[in-house]
């Protein structure tokens, strides 16, 4: 199998290298990852500037663009091969629920799916060491064929792996994305010329304890596997909008 790896933690990430080594035992692995950390880039892409691919190892490329750029440009021909699957990660820290909106790791997988290639995003739940990179990489390795059978063009697969427990072996749970709310704040400081600088701060997360959610699975020590759909729709809200009576401006005013 020919695999394209990417991430948002950057080309030097330990999670990426652990995944590359594990998958290279049985497959042809190519890497296109950001040359610097690009966490929180979501699905931004580069439109007005060139994107540089710099070869830094055998089939390993550092890209000047975003995680989505890495995958998009690779699949459009920046790399000379066609790929059977895109795997993004291993992310340092979870990508659960609404994290997926901001995540460059998720965006790289989403771009693969949008381009018609099966795609998986994989993250480890801990925010601080030790990170279970080996366990996450092995989970991906032994389930690659299953991911290909499960995948369809309307989604990518999002995986979150907690630290292993000696008391409780992993279970793998099919989940849905949870709702997670951050207590965001900003920290302000003055620059040497009186400029105002602001840093995003605050890391407390409130998650709804929903049965069957990705957060509930990881919080109970289990591996979460979620299909994340490319075109989400809330059917209840759709009916509300269809029945709404919108005011229309007088056409003659604007012609």
Image (tube, helix red, strand yellow):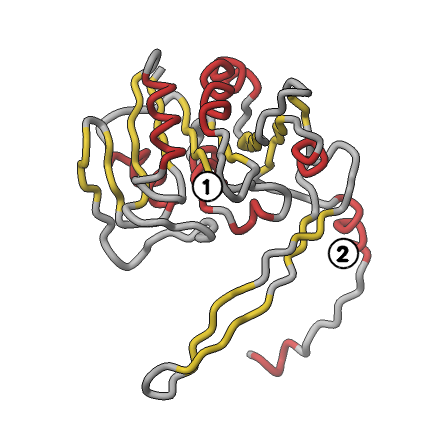
Q: Which quadrant holds the N terminus?
A: top left
Looking at the image, the residue that sits furthest to the bottom is 194
Which label was assigned to residue 230? none
Position of residue 250 relative to residue 59, above or below, is below
SS assignment at label 2: helix
Q: Residue 20 at what x, y percent from top left?
A: 34, 25
Is 32 on the left-hand or right-hand side of 94? left
SS assignment at label 1: helix
Which label was assigned to residue 241? 2
* Mark before the other along the chain sequence, 1 or 2: 1
> Residue drawn 37% across and 27% down?
18
Mark 1 neighbour density, 10 Å: few (under 14) some (14–19) many (20 or more): many
Q: Residue 13 at what x, y percent from top left?
A: 35, 39
Q: Which quadrant holds the C terminus?
A: bottom right
> Residue drawn 68% across and 25% down?
174
Position of residue 127 relative to residue 200, above or below, is above
User: Residue 63: which quarter of the image?
Assistant: top left
Q: Residue 47 at what x, y percent from top left?
A: 32, 55
Disc number lying in front (1 or 2): 1
> Residue drawn 30% across and 18% down?
28
> Residue drawn 63% across and 29% down?
224
Distance from the alpha carbon under mark 1 to that under mark 2: 32 Å
User: Residue 68: which quarter of the image?
Assistant: top left
Q: Residue 178 at what x, y percent from top left?
A: 69, 42
User: Residue 86: which quarter of the image?
Assistant: top left
Task: Identify the residue under disc 1.
Answer: 105
Is 70 on the left-hand or right-hand side of 134? left
Mark 2 neighbour density, 10 Å: few (under 14) some (14–19) many (20 or more): few
Question: How many numbered marks are there?
Answer: 2
Position of residue 29 relative to residue 238, above or below, is above
């Amino acid at each position: 199998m020919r695999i394209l790896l990417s991430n948002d933690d950057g080309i030097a990430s330990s999670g990426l290298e652990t995944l590359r080594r594990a998958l290279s035992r049985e497959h042809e692995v190519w890497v296109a990852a950001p040359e610097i950390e690009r966490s929180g880039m979501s699905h931004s892409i580069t439109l007005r500037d060139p994107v540089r691919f710099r070869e830094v190892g055998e089939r390993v490329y550092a890209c000047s663009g975003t995680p989505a750029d890495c995958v998009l440009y690779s699949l459009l021909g920046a790399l000379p091969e066609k790929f059977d699957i895109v795997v993004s990660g291993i992310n340092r820290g979870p990508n659960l629920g609404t994290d997926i909106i901001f995540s460059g790791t998720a965006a790289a997988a989403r771009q693969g799916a949008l381009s018609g290639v099966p795609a998986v995003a994989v993250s480890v739940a801990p925010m601080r060491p030790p990170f279970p990179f080996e366990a996450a990489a092995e989970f991906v390795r032994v389930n690659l064929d299953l991911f290909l059978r499960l995948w369809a063009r309307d989604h990518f697969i999002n995986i979150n792996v907690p630290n292993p427990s000696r008391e409780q072996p992993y279970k793998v749970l099919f989940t849905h994305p949870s709702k997670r709310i951050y207590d965001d704040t900003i920290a302000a400081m003055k620059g040497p010329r009186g400029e105002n600088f602001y840093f995003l701060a605050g890391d407390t997360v409130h998650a709804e304890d929903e049965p069957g959610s990705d957060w509930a699975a990881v919080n109970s020590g289990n591996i979460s596997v979620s299909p994340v759909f490319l075109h989400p729709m809330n059917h209840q809200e759709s009916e509300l909008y269809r029945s709404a009576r919108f005011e229309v401006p007088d056409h003659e005013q604007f012609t």
